[in-house]
Image (cartoon, rainbow, N blue to C red):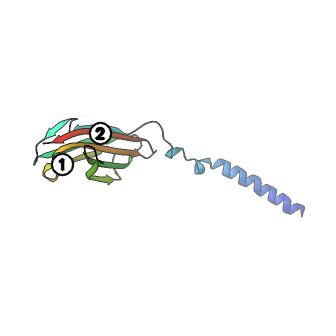
């Protein structure tokens, strides 16, 4: 009986030291915010740009983060007067490169004349987030 208690005690001590030495198994600091939000350089469109109906709206951006961009959402929102805003174009992506290069266009023929908001929502691997917005108009 004493041998069984002694064996259980030894096993408990060994298990304690093993788990204490494996602290990194339980460490979630690699997913906690680190205060470093993604960096966004939005080259186009410029804020308050005006585009003619039928022309292209360029969307060009370089996005980077010291960890990596985990989620990216790009939206074009029609800003309605007195009613709910409406997302008219967009996509979501889980990028695999760093930096992330966005280089696309929207043909204004699919848009109605009005005021729009280009919004980029970004989240990195540590849950830091950044929202970049610019306004443009279609006449």
Number of numbered markers: 2
Give the CA distance from mark 1 to mark 2: 16 Å
Looking at the image, residue 97 lies above or below residue 41: below
Q: In the drawing, does residue 74 fall left or right of residue 24?
A: left
Are the two marked residues, 1 and 2, in contact with CB atoms closer than 8 angstroms? no
Q: As rendered, which of 54 and 21 lies closer to the eye?
A: 54
- Choose top left, top right, bottom left or bottom right for residue 7: bottom right
| Residue that extends furthest to the right in the rendered view of this protein | 2
Q: Residue furthest front?
A: 82
Residue 12: x %, y % from top left: 76, 55
| Residue 84 image position (x, y, % from top left) | 30, 48
**Number of residues whose C-alpha sits closer than 10 Å to that of mark 2, classed few (under 14), some (14–19) or many (20 or more):** some
The quadrant where residue 66 appears = top left
Q: Residue at x 43, y 41 (%)?
A: 128
Q: Is residue 75 left or right of residue 51?
A: right
Image quarter in which the C terminus is found: top left
In front of the other: 99 or 22? 99
Q: Secondary structure at mark 2?
A: strand
Task: Classify 10 Å Cα crowding around label 1: few (below 14), some (14-19), many (20 and above).
Answer: some
Q: Which residue is mark 2?
A: 133
Indicate the position of residue 103 as horizontal and vertical percent values: 22, 46
The residue lying toward the viewer, choosing from 111 and 22, is: 111
- Name which of mark 1 and mark 2 comes first in the sequence: 1
For residue 60, above or below residue 7: above
Where residue 121 is drawn, which disc sits there? none
Query: The residue tagged with tag 1: helix, strand or loop?
Result: strand
The x and y percentages for residue 83 are: 28, 47
The residue under the point 32% across, 53% down is 92
Mark identifier at residue 105: 1
What's the residue at 89%, 64% (across, down)? 1
Indicate which label's residue lies in the foreground, 1 or 2: 2
At x 28% / y 44%, what residue is drawn? 82
């Amino acid at each position: 009986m004493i041998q069984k208690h002694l064996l259980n005690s030894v096993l408990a001590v060994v298990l304690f030291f093993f788990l204490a030495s494996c602290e990194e198994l339980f460490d979630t600091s690699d997913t906690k915010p680190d205060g470093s939000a993604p960096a966004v350089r939005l080259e186009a469109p410029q804020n308050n740009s005006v585009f003619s109906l039928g022309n292209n709206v360029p969307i060009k951006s370089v996005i980077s983060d010291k960890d990596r961009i985990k989620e990216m959402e790009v939206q074009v929102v029609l800003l309605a007067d007195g009613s709910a805003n409406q997302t008219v174009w967009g996509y979501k992506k889980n990028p695999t490169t760093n930096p992330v290069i966005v280089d696309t266009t929207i043909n204004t023929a699919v848009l109605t004349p009005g005021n729009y908001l280009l919004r980029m929502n970004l989240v990195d691997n540590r849950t830091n987030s950044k929202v970049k917005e610019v306004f443009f108009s279609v006449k």
